Image (cartoon, rainbow, N blue to C red):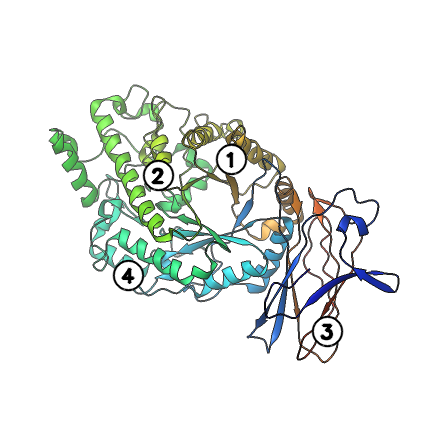
Amino acid sequence: MAIASPSAPSCCCTTRTGSTYRRFSEPISTWAGAKVQCRVLARPAITSRLNASSDGELVYELNYSQRRRRGAFPVYVKLPMDVVGPTAQTMRRKKAMAQSFRALAAAGVEGVVMEVWWGLVEREFPRIYNWQGYLEIVEMAKRFGLKVRAVMAFHQCGSGPDDLFWIPLPLWVLEEMDKDPDVSYADRFGRRSMEYISLGCDVLPVLHGRSPIQAYADLMRSFRDTFRSFLGGIITGIQVGLGPGGELRYPSCPTQKLTRAWRSRELGEFQCYDKYMLASLRACACKIGMREWGYGGPIDASSLMQSPESTEFFRSDGSWKTPYGEFFLEWYSGMLLLHGERICREAETIFRGNEVNMSGKVGGIHWHYGTQSHPSELTSGYYNTSARDGYIPIVRMFGRYSFTMCCSCFEMQDAEEQQINPASRPESFLKQLLLAARICDIPLEGENYSTNLDNESFQQVLKMSKFYSDGLEMPSFSFNFVRMDKNLFEPRNWVSFFAICEANVSCQYVSSQLRFQWRPHNLFFFIGFCFCWNGSCVLGREASVRLDLSCCARTGYRSFNVLFPGQVNAYQT
């Protein structure tokens, strides 16, 4: 075992036998005892660095790798929405987050998903960015051997100032929206959505002389330059926000409503009544000689809460099938696709050569999938009906820019959801997306829609992941668990969560951090640890290891007992 840092002292590893020590040159399975059947091939590496913030404290890290069997997939955990403060200046609850990161790393989690909120980073003034809080998150992830996926969140979080997790768009953007309300989306009743800037003004200089696409690109470029040393190593993925909730869709109904049980009745409203969207619609209608089609969306789509069959537009033989309906839906979905293409092109150019995986997210709009017209999908911008596949064009667009597609609903089942809404088909909806990803040969990221942690939900995640990957020579699938909170670490929930990690890690190693202060003594410290194979402990007892470290100047001493038996506990030092 060697210390990875070139400036660190030399190190050898021995084990105690009676009163003597012998070199750690045999496989662990040999000296651990006859009961051990498997052989651990990977050995831990120790790295060291000087912590300048604590009087010369030298920080050592034990780093272990994971090997996955065929068909297994890495698991990431999305961090709390309020993980950084309101100005992104600092990371909140650092001690609690450190304990959580320790537990996640030891459970076999690959990494964490970090939402980077535009409304926090560029909060006060244009082009003035504050990355400090997010830098602290990435540094902590590095310390515990976790990877990071960053989500560029260009949307609003929460429903209003009274919301516990309220994060609006940047204040200077809201000022521009006050001056020109048409920068935000509007429905036919004039109701405005402040969740996301209207894609109708994507390339217009409505934000202090910049277009929204330019503002998004500038923030991504600043992120790249600030985190360049972490890209490809610690930060391995960038998910680009494409609309409300970070998803490529229109805000047909408020995002916070999508998680409520009565969402099943939401048809949604077409968001095409700001002046920029109407100008585009009129231009397209005039181009085909049908000027009268350019004055707005369908007037017979009725209200949000009606049954599709009681509307003229969405019913089975409704006007969505007419030449006008086809024209409007082609334009409406085409504008959304063009918006996604613009952002994906910018992101791919900005992060090219940085060895990070780029991804974009599609909304899980499933509650009218059992009808012919799929109204809630149509109002969201997905021209997907019983007679037309609206997701293939989106998947192909992601493929052109080497993007991974992210989608949710992996834990949901048709039979369960139909008890709330007979027209809902989350499982069937997801299978259509997975088939599109297979056809277009693009990687996939899965997410859970709700925070249900029961074993049945996790089994459904495994089932849907196999639906995508079975039969593929080189399937690329990973899962983002949404999200980390105090409930995740409740004993019953943790057991369920640990099960999905256990099912996807072939060989799991513990990642731990060791700290000590220089003292005028010889340095000896002992580490108790266990290796896990398919989630089962292969060392039934502590394995004491002596590390002899020498330094040319001074030496220090501190002892540790870090034991992770079976299901993981935090450090005991």
- What x and y, as percent, mark residue 78? 51, 50
- What x and y, as percent, mark residue 334? 26, 35
Name the amino acid type tagged 4: Trp
Q: Is residue 391 above or below residue 354?
A: above
Tell me the number on the disc at residue 172. Answer: 4
Marks 3 and 4, how far apart at CA: 53 Å
CB atoms of marks 2 and 4 within 8 Å:
no
Foreground residue among 522 and 492: 522
The quarter of the image holding the C terminus is bottom right
In primary-sequence order, the first of circles 2 and 4 is 4
Mark 4 surroundings: few (<14), some (14-19) or many (≥20) residues within 10 A = some
Marks 4 and 1, how far apart at CA: 43 Å
Instruction: Confirm whether residue 157 shows in the render.
Output: no
Marks 1 and 3, how far apart at CA: 48 Å
Instruction: Confirm whether residue 12 shows in the render.
Output: yes
In primary-sequence order, the first of circles 1 and 3 is 1
Q: Is residue 362 above or below residue 65?
A: above
User: Mark 2 = which residue?
Assistant: 400
Q: Quadrant of residue 306?
A: top left
Name the amino acid type tagged 1: Pro
Tell me the number on the disc at residue 475. Answer: 1
In primary-sequence order, the first of circles 1 and 2 is 2
Marks 2 and 4, how far apart at CA: 34 Å
Secondary structure, mark 2, is helix
Mark 2 surroundings: few (<14), some (14-19) or many (≥20) residues within 10 A = few
Foreground residue among 426 and 76: 76
Marks 1 and 2, how far apart at CA: 18 Å
In primary-sequence order, the first of circles 4 and 1 is 4
Q: Can you tell which of label 3 and label 4 is closer to the viewer?
A: 3
Foreground residue among 312 and 427: 427
Secondary structure, mark 4, is helix
User: Mark 3 = which residue?
Assistant: 557
